[in-house]
Image: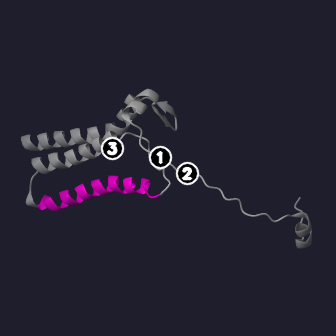
Amino acid sequence: MVKHFTRELVAEQGTIVETPVVSHETDRSFELPKGLYVATVGLYLGFLAVMAAGLSTPGLILPMAIFAFVILAGFALPTIWTRMQPQHRGRAKSWSKLASGGIATHTGRVSARDAAVQVLILPVLIFCWGIVAVTIAAFV
């Protein structure tokens, strides 16, 4: 059952201590090489370029510029965010370190090739989808 503790009992039994200072370094990077991020941004912007070239209309200039801004901001803001802590020491892995050791994920260690495939599969599919869509629009 539940027992009620009075203030007096708690005061004579308990000791007050200072709050411990816990400092831990938060790694805000994903430890992937910069080349994978550059390739991802390039493929997304390539999709926009394919769509803008294949479906060029004056009315699409503003939406394409907004999409390009959102893509660039979507990768620039996390880059800035990783550098917000002055004592931040986490850096992206080099290609050689990634190739030799892989990268730790939630489901276990992944090789460099598998990590690159996981990161680039969606941007490549979107870029190919843009090429197919423009090709279909050209023949219709």
Q: To which quarter of the image does residue 3 belong? A: bottom right
Q: Amino acid at mark 1?
A: Gly
Q: Is residue 73 left or right of residue 47?
A: right
For this orientation, the residue located farthest to the bottom is: 7
Q: Secondary structure at mark 1?
A: loop
Q: Is residue 58 left or right of residue 36?
A: left
Of residues 36 and 24, the one drawn nearer to the viewer in this rendering: 24
For this orientation, the residue located farthest to the front is: 87
Q: Tell me how many marks there are.
A: 3
- Determine the CA span between mark 1 and mark 3: 16 Å
Residue that appears at 92% across and 67% down: 12
Q: To which quarter of the image does residue 58 belong? A: bottom left
Q: Which residue is mark 3?
A: 37
- Determine the CA span between mark 3 and mark 2: 23 Å
The numbered mark, 1 or 3, whose residue comes first in the sequence reads 3
Answer yes or no: do the residues labelled 2 and 1 have beta carbons within 8 Å?
A: yes
Q: Which residue is mark 2?
A: 25
Of residues 138 and 43, the one drawn nearer to the viewer in this rendering: 43
Of residues 38 and 59, the one drawn nearer to the viewer in this rendering: 38
Q: Which residue is mark 1?
A: 90
Of residues 36 and 57, the one drawn nearer to the viewer in this rendering: 36
